[in-house]
Image: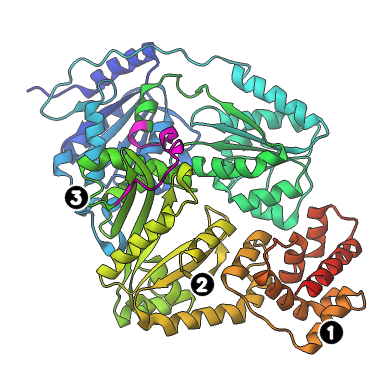
Amino acid sequence: MPAIDIKRWMTTLLAQLRTSRQRQLVLLQGPQAWCDSQLAALSGLDVALLLLSNRSELPAAIAFDKVETCLGSESRLVVMDLFDGFNPDVLCIAGGLVRAAGVLILLSPESENWDTASDRYACWQGGKRSPRAFFVEYFFRSLQLDGEIGIPLTPDTQPGSTPVLPQLEQTLVENGETAEQSVILQQIEKWADGKPGGCILISADRGRGKSTCLGLLAARLQARHRLLVSANSRSTAALLLARVPTIEFVAPDQLLRHCPQADLVLIDEAAMIPLPMLRQLTRIYPKLVLATTTGGYEGTGQGFMLRFVADMESRGLQRYRLESPVRWCRGDLLEAWLNRCLLLQAEDDEAVESQQSVDDYTIELLAQPGAAENWPLLRRVYALLNSAHYRTRPSDLRMLMENPDQRLLVAHRDNNVIGVALLNLEGGFSETLCDEIFYGRRRPQGHLLAQMLTAQSGLKRFAGYRGLRVQRIAVAAGCRRRGLGTRLLEYAFELGRDNGLDYMGASFALDPDSASFWQQAGFRLVHVSFARGKSSGNHSVAVLRLINPALEPDIKQLQQRIQRQLPIWLIQFLQTMEAQQVTALLRFADYRYEPAELELQEIEAFASGNKGFELCFASLQRFVMGCIARGADSPDRLLVEKAVQNRDWRLLERESGSDGRRQLQQRLRLQVDALRKAC
């Protein structure tokens, strides 16, 4: 059979796509040498080609871990090399880099001969390999079943006629703006020039010109307003900054630390910034415009939208959405297929929402979640996780399918998934490895609790115990607060007991609801992380429920450590923790303190105005902590932030809008006096 003239064939395909304005996917599948020869021929085309590959021998290749630097750019041909492994996050990014009438090209071994031993993305905790390339099978099967997207080319086959694709209309752009952008810009500009403050959220799927919209807004406003731009990194805001190079970029943590003056703060990809940081920014700055992507490789959109919108709607949040694609056309088949295959958009859960009872369901341990017969159920599992958590990336889908140390519990009724618990086997290390972890020389991948309690909490032999970590747990919105989550945990506990494990635990971003859930389920607080989580922005905590009673002395040591050191942590490492998180932490830790007579006199002296705050702080802090831990009502934010965390007076003045330190201190005296009488 004569070899295909790939260069001529691709030229014909690109001409057809220019007419339809569609995008297409081409699969070059065969031996590596053959695929490389086809790539070399394609490089001779008079068309811009972007190559994504981990193989250093390929010229001008961008490694997968550097591919985020390409965000915002576009190319007519984008090539993704799968010979070093299949990373679904990179596939998602690659699809967004292909411009209208372009082609996404995959270089791939034959799927039936896929070697998980050479696939760097098939390696999980402890160096364990995927038992089978379930995600790869799922991906190529999805491609095979689609009649319009995906043209396979192999050394032994000649391509058939290319599918005739529906013709699309390009979104009209006039003066650098789409009609949709123009309407939104006019409304936001009018708001920015007016007096009322508040927050605006612009959401969009990828390729809708969201960052461009922020850049256009900045260009319109910078002459008459003091503007600042922020994002989780400067590269994230690169498109915006390129449009208005004179505008100042300030990272979110620097905004909170230094509070530079601004009339309006523009935040790109807001879903990548922790929600508590955004809440603080809304208190400091009078006007903010946030933009976020609602689906994509970041996996941040849906969970962020649920939390941020619920948090801000009572404060007059204004929402706008961009629907029209700019980089490609509305109705693009490649985008629709990637959304379906990688489950980038949340599925409709109206059927679950309408259910009133959670009694008639089944909990099952799903063996081999990646097997073909489980794909329909797994889609609903992934959709539930995506709607409930801050970040569920496309790579998590592969993890669900292939990680040999994970266990998946699914609560379902008929065809509805109403609850999920994702569990991870941990620990069981030798004494030698425990020592290495304790001294910070080793960090075994995936064993989060085992190494956290060994290296950070100081239990030198804890990593030798075998445990079951609840990595994620989610319940459908219409079925929450009815005991289903607790029943999933009970099922998991029995699973751990039946397998001779020593403990069951979890690490999660601390918030009042989560703390209450785990405490009521019988878990004990054993560790507090000093660093904020990158996704949630909250400090993480670790909780345990013992299966093996021999661990009881260790657990008591950890709880005693928290009691002794928590006052210091709160003014040092946890000083920026939000007040409601501090309250939840004190109550979960069951913090206890009985002040001596001299301390009670000092507290009374402060409350009556006879002593200043600094002279009384040591006594005040522990007294207030104990009262909050025992109290039922939520304490005033000032009481927590000053009397417990000793935050800077100037920052508190700025956030509260008070007339100065004297007014704040008087307010604090009244609160301490009320607390003294109540406790």
Q: Which residue lies furthest to the left in this view?
A: 1
Report crowding for label 2: few under 14, some 14 to 19, many 20 or more residues within 10 A (C-alpha). Answer: many
Image quarter where the N terminus lies is top left
For the residue pair 115 and 38, the one nearer the viewer reads as: 115
Mark 2 or mark 3, which has the lower sequence index? 3
Verify whether residue 546 appears in magenta. no
Identify whether 544 is placed above or below 357. Answer: below
Identify whether 504 is placed above or below 551. Answer: above
The residue that disc 1 covers is: 601
What secondary structure is marked by label 3? loop
Q: Give the range drawn in magenta.
A: 340-363
Q: Indicate the quadrant where residue 158 lies.
A: top left
Verify whether residue 343 appears in magenta. yes
The amino acid at mark 3 is Arg
- Callout in the foreground (2, 3): 2
Q: Which mark is residue 132?
A: 3
Mark 1 or mark 2, which has the lower sequence index? 2
The residue that disc 2 covers is: 527
- Which residue does the image show at 26% across and 40% down from the upper left? 375
Q: Indicate the quadrant where residue 439 lies.
A: bottom left
Q: Which residue lies furthest to the bottom in this view?
A: 597
Q: Indicate the quadrant where residue 412 lies.
A: top left
Report crowding for label 3: few under 14, some 14 to 19, many 20 or more residues within 10 A (C-alpha). Answer: some
